[in-house]
Amino acid sequence: MGKLLKEYFSIIYQRKINPLVFSFICITFFIHLNGCVKNNETNQKVKKEVPTSLSKSEVNFTGYIKGVIKEGSENYLIIDTVEWFSGEDAIQSFNKDKKEGKNKIDEITNGYYIRNVKIDSLKFRMSDTAKVTMQTLSYNQSGNYNFNEKIDISKFISLLNNEEYQRFKQKLYKFQILNNEIVSIKEIYLP
C-alpha cells in the first residue's frame, strides 16, 4: 500500500491529478477499508452457540438485527438482544439504571425505554416460512404508515441486504424462536 501512495503522490507532484480529487479518492478508499474491517470483526464476534436461556423450544425476545449471513441455502440473522419497556415499567427501569449509572440519557422518550447493558451477537437460522410484519415499510395515500404490513421472508432478506434500506437494521424487532429457528419477526414502531 505504501508503494501505491508513493505513486499517487508522484502523480500529484507532476500535476497530473488535482489534489482535491486525490483527497477524495484517499478518503473514499479508507472509508471502504474501514467498512471491510468492521464487517470482518462482526463476523468474527458472532456467537456460534445459543445460550441455554434461549435454547428452550419456544422463546420470544426483542432486539436489533446486526447482520444477515447466508450459509449454503440457509439464511441466518445476527441479533443483539435488548430489554424493551413501556409505560410504568419504562419509568421504573430507567430510574433504576440511572441510579446505578448504567445509562447516559436524561429522560425517557415517547413512553418507552430500551436497556442494552451487554451487546451480544446471537445467530439464528430463519425459517423459510417465517412470518414478517413491518410497521414502517410503506405509506398509504394519506402519508401514514401501513401498519402491520405482512411481507415474505425473501423480501425481508432483500431489504436487509440492500444498501438503500439499511434503516431496517436500525429498527427494533420482536422475534419468536421455535427450536432455535426464527418463525416470526415483527417490527416495533417507535415514534
Image: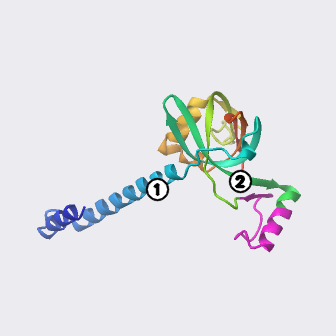
Q: So how many labels did they put on this image?
A: 2
Report the magenta residues as a range: 92-115
- Looking at the rendering, which quadrant does residue 102 occupy? bottom right
Image quadrant containing the N terminus:
bottom left
111 magenta-colored: yes
The image shows residue 75 at horizontal and vertical percentages of 55, 34
Give the image location of residue 18, x and y in percent. Answer: 21, 65
Q: Residue at x 25, y 63 (%)?
A: 22
Place of residue 80 in the rendered image (x, y in percent of width and height, measured from the top left): 64, 51
**Residue at (29% x, 65% y) in the render:** 23
Q: Where does label 2 land, which residue? A: 82
Tell me if 148 is positioned left or right of 16 in this view.
right
Q: First in sequence: mark 1 or mark 2?
A: 1
Gap in Å between the C-alphas at discs 1 and 2? 22 Å
Q: Are marks 1 and 2 in contact (CB under 8 Å)?
A: no
Tell me the element at label 1.
helix
Q: Amino acid at mark 1?
A: Lys
- Give the residue type that dot 2 points to: Val
Q: Nearer the viewer, residue 86 or 58?
A: 58
Q: Outermost residue, top direction?
A: 129
Q: Which residue position is annotated with label 1?
A: 38
In the rendered image, the residue lying farthest to the right is 88
Q: Residues within 10 Å of mark 1 (few under 14, many from 20)?
A: few
Q: Quadrant of residue 152?
A: top right
Q: Position of residue 92 (x, y in %)?
A: 86, 63
Task: For label 2, count other residues whose C-alpha is less than 10 Å away and answer few (under 14), some (14-19) or many (20+).
Answer: some
Residue 84 visible in the displayed image: yes
Q: Residue at x 74, y 73 (%)?
A: 101
The circle on residue 88 is none
